[in-house]
Amino acid sequence: MARAFVMGNLSHLNVNLAAAQPSATYRMIDRVAERRAAGHTVISLSAGEPDFDTPPHVRHAAIEAIHAGHTRYTQVAGLRALREAVANKFKRENGLDVSWRDTIVCSGGKQVIFNALAATLNAGDEVIIPAPYWVSYPEIVQLCGATSVAVPCTENTGFKLTAEALVSAITPRTRWLILNSPSNPTGAVYSHEELRSLAAALVAHPDILILSDDIYEHLIFDCATFYTIAQVEPRLAERTLTMNGVSKAYAMTGWRIGFGTGPAWLLDAMEKLQGQQTSGACSISQHAALAALNGPQQFVGETCAVFERRRNMVVNSVNDILGLHCTMPGGAFYVFASCRDWIGRTTSSGTKLNTDEDVALALLDEANVAVVHGSAFGLGPYIRIAYANRDEALRAACSAIRNFRTKLHD
Ligand code: GLU
């Protein structure tokens, strides 16, 4: 009833919300749930979340926290002990000179980003977002009433932003640049040299803030080293929000704990916003995150090795399917595959594939495999395959996609 009321009264909506799109990843997650409820067996390669259980010592810490009565409000910016652990993480792993006061804990990485953008953006402000991008960046910018400026980054540059492309996108209204390495949806990883070149361009534009979304930091392959821009160019630290969280590294997506470090004025503004919104992250989840950051770290390396093996398997299988093509991603758990050759073809049930969204929907309906269409990430015609799933499921999905292709006709 409530939903019908809202839908029937669109004029009541905030104009920025009315113009925003729902999350494309969650739309596919919902479609999978509907199809499963209708009795179909669907292999989901749509949600970007590790398929592993949260490590036992982290789960135990949460249970202990409940028994110890840590079930009340915490400080808005997070428990001091957790903020100290976050500061240590930034020092230990990223070489950033951070005290606990320079940190904030939020309800997931998404809220760190939302807080930062909502705290700073006004109508007319521009945010540069290299495309392909995570679906939520432009929508959060839209919700804040500002304008996103997508900069196309194709396979020719490894789906990465170059300094030249960055500089040509900068205008007097540019307020933020969003960087994400390893990238969702391409898995592209920026090298030290590539970040240095972007940093050199940014040093010449002192009014631009930088948001570095490092949530996939620990999922990095081929013995590569992870770098974040504030570490590569310390002069940018005073205007960079370095954001991370426990979701991907410790298989803790549902616990909703993200964190960040940045300039004091920005963290203060984010805390003020959070204090009027969620009052802070869940106390039990904060104790779990503390155990994740301060406890044994083997889980991180072990799961990364599993993802690397799966990546190799999925990339080989995808490139073996007629008309699909993908490059080798350096990190995260996504393969971004071009489906250009499938566009214009018709499926066995008579559906014409005019767009990559048609491809994703037909794969769900006719092959029972869920992926997300590339256009939702700002570059089509592609599909994003999240290989955070068991080996057997990945093999079955690739064979269902191959079978789907054999039935396409001109
Ligand atoms: N970040 C993940 C994804 O891209 C989780 C869903 C979301 O928040 O978009 O699938």
Image (cartoon, rainbow, N blue to C red):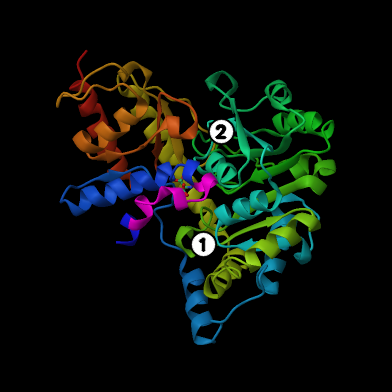
* Foreground residue among 170 and 227: 170
Q: Which residue is mark 1?
A: 256
Disc 1: residue Cβ within 8 A of ligand 1's nearest atom: no
| Rendering quarter of residue 106 | bottom right
Classify residue 106 as left or right of residue 64.
Answer: right
Placement of 101 over or under 406, stated as above or below:
below
Residue lying furthest top: 410
Quadrant into which the N terminus falls: bottom left
Instruction: Please indicate, yes or no, whether residue 335 appears anywhere in the rendered image.
Output: yes
The residue closer to the viewer here, 10 or 70, is: 10
Indicate the secondary structure of the residue bearing disc 1. loop
Q: Residues within 10 Å of mark 2 (few under 14, many from 20)?
A: many
Quadrant of res 174: top right
Query: What percent of the width, then of the height, locates residue 155?
Result: 53, 21
- Mark 1, Cα crowd under 10 Å, few <14 / some 14-19 / many 20+, is many
Instruction: Please identify the quadrant where the C terminus is shown.
Output: top left
**Residue bounds of the magenta highlight:** 5-17
